[in-house]
Image (spheres, coloured by chain):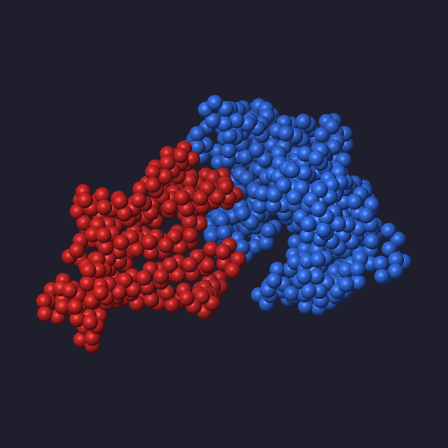
Amino acid sequence: MQSRSSTTDTGTLAKWGQFCRSHPFTAVAGVILIVLVLAALLAPYLGTVDPRKINILPRMRPPSPQAWFGSDQLGRDVWTRTLYGARISLMVGLMVALMSISLGLLIGMISGYMRKLDAVIMRVMDGLMSIPGILLAIGLVSVSGASFITVTIAITVPEIPRVVRLVRAIVLSVREEPYVEAAIAVGTKTPLILWRHVLPNCVPPLIVQATYVAASAMLTEALLSFLGAGTPPEIPSWGNMMAEGRIVFPIAPWIVLIPGCTLALAILAVNVLGDGLRDRLDPKIAKRM
Amino acid sequence: MNTAHTPASETILSIRDLSVALPASGDRSYAVQDLTLTIHPGEIVCVVGESGSGKSVTAQAVMGLLPKGQLQPSSGTILLEGEDLLAASPDRLRDLRGSRMAMIFQEPMTALNPVLTVGDQVAEVLHIHTTLDAAACRARVLEMMRAVHLPDPERMIDAYPHQLSGGQRQRIMIAQALILDPALLIADEPTTALDVTTQAQILKLIREMQVRRGTGVLFITHDFGVVADIADRVVVMQHGKLVESGTRDEIILRPQHPYTKMLIASVPSLTPPARAPVTGPVALETTKLSKIYQSGGGWFDKGRIVRAAHEVNLSLRRGETLGVVGESGSGKSTVARCIARLIDPSEGGIWLEGENIATLPQARLRKHRKTVQVIFQDPFRSLNPRRTVGQSIIEGPTNFGLSEQEALERARDLMALVGLSPDALSRYPHQFSGGQRQRISIARALAMQPHILIADEAVSALDVSVQAQVLELLDQIRVKFDLALLFITHDLRVAAQICDRLMVMQKGEVVEEGATVDIFKNPQHPYTKALFDAAPGHDFARSH
């Protein structure tokens, strides 16, 4: 038995290797994302200076060997600010994905399994879904001030109903499975049924959903920051950088283009990775391809 | 049927040395190996075999419908009226399908498009292969629908598939297949999803259409009763190879190959053996048990009411097997699920150990969960694919306070009891065959040490040879643990073999009840008589 399980382990590894070969874009996207995460984590050690340091003399210097990405209109180093901006962007993506998936999972399981609560929960979700995320963010910011947490909450709330709907649909189909009925028949209590028999079925589609949520959260954060309703201006974020560079775009386009392209690359990578994971984790779609 | 001296030029279908290769990862190298068979005009050739015998692959190979990239004919020829189908271009095959060869499938609901009227779907064949105008098409379709004995064709032609019964849908499929008078009709388990009474009508219809039009029929089935009713010649397949072929009487009365003998011996006889009445204590009683489903409806409208089960009274003794037989929609599964409290009964009582559990809330029901256990129909869905067999079996006992170690000990004993190796506990369900999984389900039920076992169509999804083994196992454990067995089935042959008493249900009501032997010898209710008449293979039963 022991040897058998170890062969399946190498089998899984080999399968992932084969998958990467047959889905080269997914592999590339994964690598890009890893590089971005490492860059964000190791930002202080990658030839950067203080991202908030204003330096009047070298203003709007174009990219050069000394300052790889040039400097902005306040003389701040764009390379430094791009790396520190990655922290905000990736963090928002991660936090929103984690929060909306975990809350959505909880609410979705309750809604799908406890039919009496279902109608109420789903109407509340419909209500939440009808709130435009950007308006909610602007509203929250005007009440409690711009901060990382406000932005994260504002982006998370409208994402939750989408996750709830996904989870609820899976729960509704799994609860009819004979093995769930068998579990009821042997006296397994409801929370344990949800944990043992229902939850594992939700995980693969949720991983895929999480990537889409993360990508759209990163985009929304950049948009909010660009509009001035996102992360406060003293924190370097890609949206803030683009908003500030916008005025001087004709003379110093790199101030907008560098964070803009990085954002596009990051979102593309997350989305492509999500598509790849979907092919890998959803056998129905994988078979069709 | 005098096929022996029909000239070769008159064969409709001639398959010679056909082999279909399986992908390298399969457990054998060929799905079909060196298969040779011929079909003459007006002849029904039955291909019989258990699952995995390659009978459906043969049909797909003829139709040119093998899944691309997975299955590939590797050698041999398939001649349809002298034309080599394996050499034909995809365009030519498309031309031939529908006009010279046609196919009907097992599941008439999924084989029809739900958003098109059935008339349009039959007419589609005409649009593709003929130049008839709309009015002429409609006339042909109506004529065909009359020919397959659909009631009120003028109205039904504009109906959608969901508005038709299963039997009517299969008639539509047959109309669609035969409207252009193909030389060859392939029927892939066309009656397996139907009730016996409907099955008998559809078999009669296929017979009638085929005689009138001289169609050659390749009829794929696993059911020897159907073979006995419909076949001219029989081809028996096992693991992709032909093991025996001959006329119906040769195969059924004088089988030569041990596999054929085993298959025929596994078919339960329609004559129940004599059984002594069981006198054990009453384990379960229901009184006026009813389940009403209400669909639709709102504040002002009560919606549609369906009486799935209506005032069912039954009593079941320890050591007794009570069979509940009926067709789909008769309410037999509803009764079983109410007793197991998987659904809540609407009215009536379920008496277990002196307590009425019909209305007990879940919390107080829990101690009774040990008493009643269920074995489900579908062995592929009744075990959680993500949990090991061991985890599935010990789930129940650990719910009731047994330590994991003790539960595993019990599971090991039970695995041996149901004829599986205790090592199998650490494996996953997908590593087992259907019959093995059903054994695991039985072990899981027994792990709770129940007094009452409900088998809800527990052997219906299994091949006959496996079915016979599982039935034997059920009977053994009934004796060993003095179980009360509630056996839900649509299969009269199975019921005859295993049940002490029978309850016949129709439309939610019990229409007849009594000792199995008495009911089989002398059925009283017209519905019971109709069920018995419709059971396929009466000749077979007598000769068998």
Q: Is residue A194 visible?
A: no
Q: Position of residue B20 (x, y in %)?
A: 67, 64
- Which chain is drawn using red? A
**Residue B153 image offset from top left, x and y in percent:** 71, 36
Work out whether A87 lies above or below B125. Answer: below
Residue at left offset 63%, top offset 63%: B71
For the point 74% across and 47% down, the residue is B179
Residue in the image at 32% along x and 65% along y = A34
Left or right: where B380 falls relative to A97: right
Q: Is any part of residue A261 visible from this angle?
A: yes
Using the rendered view, name the quadrant where residue A245 is placed.
bottom left
Question: Which chain is displayed in blue in the rendered image?
Answer: B
- In the rendered image, which quarter is residue A41 located in? bottom left
Question: In the picture provided, is B229 more to the left or to the right than A48?
Answer: right
- In the image, farthest residue toward the right: B5
- Farthest residue in the bottom direction? A65
